[in-house]
Image: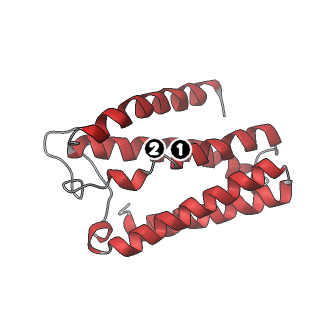
């Protein structure tokens, strides 16, 4: 991860951490919920990319970078992105530029049990990735990335229109 990506990740995490407690206490506007979940997913993507590259041999394996990214994913997922799929966020929010746009499919709300199952599967895969990273076992680390990728893809295939 380059310096600008690290700064972006740090900024987004700081904004999300500061805003999460405040937002949870007040009734959240749909555009704020959309912005929160998009921010979390963007930071997830910035961290998964290098892990996938290392696991696939497309970039050199760096245990320190791998471990930092894997543990960061665990922390980011602990922010519970599904909590931001609130009523009113199933479609674009009129008058809201970036945060009002969403790729969320209606199935998130019409099939909430399957959506929760997908989220639980992702949480489990991310937890196993962090555990593998803590072990230092390169083979286990690379294998665990594949499971995270499958969990993410499965959820996106079923619940994201893109």
Residue that appears at 37% across and 74% down:
113
Mark carried by residue 76: 1
**Helix, strand or loop status at disc 1:** helix
**Image marks 1 and 2: residues in contact by CB distance under 8 Å:** yes
Q: Is residue 83 left or right of residue 56?
A: left
Q: How did the renderer colour the structure?
A: secondary structure
Q: Is residue 108 above or below residue 12?
A: below
Residue 32 coordinates in the image, percent (x, y):
27, 40
Q: Local crowd at mark 1 within 10 Å, few (<14), some, or many (≥20)?
A: some
Residue that appears at 40% across and 28% down:
18
Can residue 95 be seen?
yes
Quadrant housing residue 72? top right
**Helix, strand or loop status at disc 2:** helix
Q: Is residue 95 above or below residue 77?
A: above
Quadrant location, the C terminus: bottom left
The CA distance from mark 1 to mark 2 is 7 Å
Q: Local crowd at mark 2 within 10 Å, few (<14), some, or many (≥20)?
A: many
Q: Is residue 79 left or right of residue 67?
A: left
Can residue 98 be seen?
no
Residue 138 coordinates in the image, percent (x, y):
85, 54
Residue 61 coordinates in the image, percent (x, y):
82, 45
1 or 2: mark nearer the eye: 1
Q: Is residue 98 left or right of residue 115?
A: left
Q: Is residue 132 left or right of residue 7?
A: right
Quadrant housing residue 131? bottom right
Mark carried by residue 40: 2
Q: Is residue 159 above or below residue 145?
A: below
Mark carried by residue 128: none
């Amino acid at each position: 991860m380059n310096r600008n990506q690290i700064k972006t990740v740090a900024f987004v995490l700081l904004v999300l951490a500061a805003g999460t407690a405040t937002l949870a206490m007040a009734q959240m506007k749909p555009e704020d919920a959309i912005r929160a979940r998009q921010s979390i997913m963007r930071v997830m993507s910035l961290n998964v990319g290098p892990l996938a590259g290392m696991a696939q041999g497309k970039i050199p394996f760096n245990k320190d970078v791998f471990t930092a990214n894997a543990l960061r994913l665990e922390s980011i997922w602990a922010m519970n992105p599904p909590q931001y799929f609130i009523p009113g966020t199933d479609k674009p929010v009129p008058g809201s530029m970036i945060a009002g746009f969403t790729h969320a499919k209606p199935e998130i709300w019409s099939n909430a049990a399957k959506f929760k199952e997908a989220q639980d599967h992702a949480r489990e895969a991310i937890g196993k990735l962090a555990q593998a990273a803590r072990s230092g076992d390169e083979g286990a680390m690379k294998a665990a990335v594949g499971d995270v990728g499958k969990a993410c893809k499965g959820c996106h295939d079923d619940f994201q229109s893109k």
